[in-house]
Amino acid sequence: MIQQIAFVLILGLATFFIRKRVLRIRDNIKLGKNNSITDRKSERLNNLLLVALGQKKMFKKVIPAILHVFIYVGFLVINLEVLEFVIDGLLGTHRIFAPYLGSFYGMLMNLFEFLAVAVLLACVFFLIRRNVMKVARFQSAEMKKWPTLDANLILITEIVLMTAILTMNASDQLLQGRDEHYVATGNLFFSSFLIPALENFSTSTLIFIERFAWWFHIIGILGFALYVTYSKHLHIFLAFPNTYYGKLEAKGHINNMPVVTNEVKSMLGIATEAPAPPTEPGRFGAKDINDLNWNNLLAAYTCTECGRCTAECPANLTGKKLSPRKIMMDTRDRMEEVGNSLASGGAGLNDGKSLLGDYISKEEINACTSCNACVEACPVLINPLEIIIELRRYVSMEESGAPASWNSMYQNIETNFAPWKFSPSDRFNWANENK
Amino acid sequence: MNIPTVADLVAKGESPEVLFWVGCAGSYDDRYKRVTKAFVKILNAVGTKFAVLGTEETCTGDPARRAGNEFLFQMQAMANIQVLNGYGIKKIVTACPHCFNTIKNEYPELGGNYEVIHHSTFLQQLINEGHIKLEGGGTFKGKKITYHDSCYLGRANNIYEAPRQVLEILDADLVEMKRCRTTGLCCGAGGGQMFKDAEKGKKEVNIERAEEALATGATTIAVACPFCMTMMMDGVKNKNREADVQVKDLAELIVEAKGL
């Protein structure tokens, strides 16, 4: 009974804090501009199924993809077991599904154990890749300190949680012969390897170990779920909406600015068919997160900092400061800063800081070649280029702060209708030149 | 060379089947003018009824949009669309992937709807339809050629095979760089970079790419974009290899192989 009350309390607390965090993230994303995305639903669903559920783009790198699939399937399937944990916790039962499912229950448990071992090994391998092999994309400047610790904490937590499951099952198997509370599950293959280490313990010690592992696992899962909302690991949920709302146009297409279209049309004396939509008060381009579209902000929360974008970026590869991953990380960090400030009654967006300037520098955005390598590389359809272009728009149109040579290029286009300083009347001269 | 303008044709009560959009580099850049002329030679040779805008053509606005000046981009776009729609243009071919991308993907939202094809696709179609034939392969037979993917053809518009199929009729030894197709490395000029110096770094992007191209052992680096052309030529020059390695556009290679 005490255990049940404790369980209800813990479950309630976890739900409370996770819900609070989820609402905060939702509010932060809603700081962005409200562009409605309601078109091409079947293509969007297709992207969600292929890219998020089907992990299609992960398979450009086969070995990490296979290991990632283990963790991903493990996450999906082992969470079914968590359902049983919760029911047992609430009702004070033990393995409530076992009597109903009979030998199928044992098969399920063996499957879970297989996945637990697969997850465990994959996490160990990922830790080695990050910390021993030092794969280059995990060592970039923006990965120093917290992002690296964050990644390692997530991997270690998963290893510990999987170890808890296996320990629990091993002690459970031993107890099945000794205590009638422990229903028969049949032989569990993987956890049986731990039995030699446990079989000399007394029944009461084993019960303690089993209970400890059970509580450790469920509290660990709940704690991890809460931790995820503060970490880079939100992609496990947000990859689904992010792929659904991902860009469908050709990658070369840059989003139009209807506000500008209306102004240009009236300047050129072209009648607009529809009356001009109410012009949104606001800036041209983006200086801060509220100038970006909400789906750019969703993308920032979705980013799990794998760095495949940065590893393909020609600017980054040749030593420039630009890193597409950092663009996404900065966007999220700024959202968190504004969100925390608003929640505590602070100045929020008016805190004197902004995404451009305090987080992302002009030097970074100016270095982009718009080559779309980052967009192509992202396994969950994040588009750092959209954010870079919006920031450039602000610099060019609101600040007139583009590099001097770009201002010359603008001037050439305005006066000569070509980005270079040539006379428009010479444009057709090539036709009369021999060689 | 027969190079009619749309205005000429319209004056005669005719209209072109296809408008050849020359682009700023194709009009003014000495090196890329040779590509423009090579493509015109092919158009003439196969008897395509084409025309150019001549002095009525202006910058599509691509570099302005990508550098962040949306006003300037849209001013250019609207002005061009007015001219194109005024002439009732239906189909456009261009040798510049940036012009291609902008007119194809960005003009429709502003009222410009045309069938737009890049000259690599156009050449591929001419080959497939039997209008361009090369018996015995011509001058490039057996020579090593590597193709550098333009970002604005490749990733931006998923055109990876057309340029390679054009090269195939040369009967050359096509070698790929390690980073090709979807993972092709940019030449470093897109997104407005053509018009300013690079930010501080440890290397220029075009040197990195030129080294990769040279490492294939190819004696010809095939390109399909004026910016890539400039960047790759500079890269090859930087490596002091301009004497034995040439950078050529697809149209030029066809013209040379056929002796047009």
Image: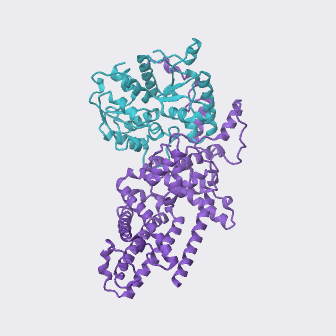
> What x and y, as percent, mark residue A175?
36, 82
> What x and y, as percent, mark residue A304?
48, 58
Q: Residue at x 31, y 79 (%)?
A: A195
Q: Is residue B206 above or below residue A323?
A: above
Q: Is residue A17 left or right of residue A221?
A: right
Q: Closer to the camera, B50 or B29?
A: B50
> What x and y, as percent, mark residue A361?
56, 52
Residue A151, quarter of picture: bottom left
User: On the rendered image, what quadrant is the N terminus of chain B found in?
Assistant: top left
Q: Closer to the camera, A185 or A40?
A: A185
Total marks in image: 0
- For the colour cyan, the matching chain is B
- Does the image show residue A219? no
Q: Is residue B73 above or below residue A335?
A: above
For the rendered model, the colour scheme is: by chain
Q: Closer to the camera, B121 or B54?
A: B121
> What x and y, as percent, mark residue A311?
42, 52
Residue B120, quarter of picture: top left
Drawing shade for chain A: purple
- Does the image show residue A107? yes
Q: Closer to the camera, A238 or A227?
A: A238
Q: Is residue B71 left or right of residue A373?
A: right
**Residue, far top:** B12
User: On the rendered image, what quadrant is the C terminus of chain B found in?
Assistant: top left
Q: Residue at x 58, y 17 (%)?
A: B7
